[in-house]
Amino acid sequence: MVTVARARVRAIMVPVRRPGLWHTPRGLRFRVTVAFALGSLALATLLAAGTFLVARHYLLRQRERALVQQSFVDARAVRDELERRTGVPELLGRLDRVPGSNVVLATQGRWFGTSVALGRENLPDGLVAAVRRGEPVRQRVVVGGRPALVVGLPLAGVDTLYFQAFPLDELDRTLRTLRNALATGTALTAILGGVLGLWVSGRVLRPLSQTTAAAERVAGGDLATRVEVTDDPDLAPLARSFNRMVDAVQQRIERERRLTADVSHELRSPIASLQAAARMIERRADTLPGELAEPFALLRSQIERLRVLIEDLLELFRADAGTEALELAPVRLDLLVAEAAHPHLGATCRLEVDEAVRRRRVLLDRRRIERVVVNLLDNAATYAGGATALRVRSVDGMVRIEVEDRGPGVPGDERDRIFRRFYRGRAAASGGTGGSGLGLALVAEQVRLHDGDVWVEDAPGGHGARFVVTLPWREPPEGVGR
């Protein structure tokens, strides 16, 4: 079965510490949602606080007004009884007062009360002092852990101070209920604001999401993707600009593909003629003057190099055009690698094959994997003084091919770029070594088609580089190639 797979070419990079939760960049939709939620929370909080303060002020004022009036009525009754010489204990015992309220009298230096829960010790000194000066006073206090309103009145003519405490439990419960209801409403408003913000941001950002998805498809190679132009005067220019950009990119890529294909095809014929002429001269090499032998050898090597370059360009062109497909077949990987690497193996380069790989077959495109092995070994020979080890292993269900060399290694900032086309690296440029810069690009392309990975890292011990290729271990169908 023939399949075409996607690539993942990666470099071993230094890990970067991830930002903390509060420093992680947030998306626009998240920020809009949070803004709606916080705005709703702030507005609801202001309204709830204003409502609570107004209601509390109103209820307290109405309650205090009624209780103060009642205390004046009760105080007048007490004064009338005292003028009739009624005894204070008897007076307090039959006093008709508001249920739950308590009365305290200070007369002739003595203090009397209707309840042991309220006495002189419960009355603020400032309130008592004001009443002694003849001023009617009211003040909210806590008596026995319960809120109360104390009204103090001087009783003229009987030299008595009158204090009456009214419980405010019911009003306090009402205010607490109101406060809890407003707090709950504020929280619900904030949640509804967040939900509304999420919905609104989704509606507003939907065209941007569609444009982003289209850009992803274009980046993946689908140049036929276009964004629908709507009637929205704010979004229509964006859609038109995006479509014009994709049109321009598509046209430029098509022009480059045609140019590459035309140049490569046009060059193949003269290269073939040059090769044929070189072979004819080689057959008559014994008739050439001695001083022409070296120039002829150089000419022949450069013709071969040009042929390889053109073949590489054609293969990359076919990959860009999407016409490349895998021709999968059951392959003995250990034999394939050994045959491809044969010219490079020897005392300085050893081949190591795991027992898990030996004599087993895997579905691969033989020609492409041979090209991967040859290019990696040629790259080591050209730029790093040759390979020192070639390993074939099975790791976590993947085929792993490793090539180690004795070179200076690959700097961290070049480990991704060396797989780009025509990139040869600083070491190659400074050393004046040959090579077109297409070998590793072709490795990356062949690995991409196999749905594999390729990267470079430091060799063990820090001397040299290690190129690593991983490929999916695809077992042949039962009974095929076993």
Image (spheres, rainbow, N blue to C red):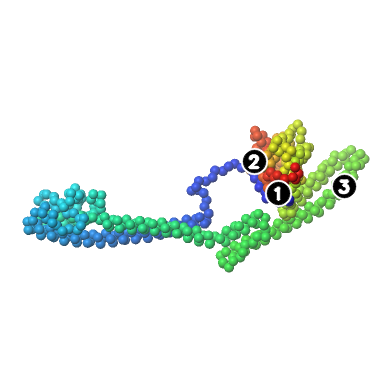
Q: Where is residue 198 in the image (x, y as percent from the top left)?
A: 50, 58
Instruction: Tell me if residue 464 can be seen.
Output: yes
Q: In this view, does 132 lie to the left or right of 261?
A: left
Q: Which amino acid does label 2 sit on?
A: Asp
Q: Is residue 133 left or right of residue 371?
A: left
Q: Where is residue 92 in the image (x, y as percent from the top left)?
A: 13, 54
Residue beneath disc 3:
276
Residue beneath disc 1:
449
Q: Is residue 390 left or right of residue 212?
A: right
Q: What residue type is labelled 3?
A: Ala
Q: In terms of sequence position, does the residue under pointer 2 or pointer 3 come before the other?
A: 3
Q: Give SS at disc 2.
A: loop
As drawn, 168 above or below 406: below
Mark 2 vs mark 1: give the one in front: 2
- Callout 2: 10 Å neighbours few (<14), some, many (20+)? few
Q: Position of residue 87 (x, y in %)?
A: 8, 54
Q: Give SS at disc 1.
A: helix
Question: Given the current orientation, which residue lies at the most extreme top position?
Answer: 347
Residue 85 placement: quadrant: bottom left
Question: Given the current orientation, which residue lies at the most extreme right position?
Answer: 287
Q: Is residue 135 left or right of residue 365?
A: left
Residue at point 23%, 50% (across, down): 143
Q: How far apart are marks 2 and 1 (CA)?
A: 20 Å
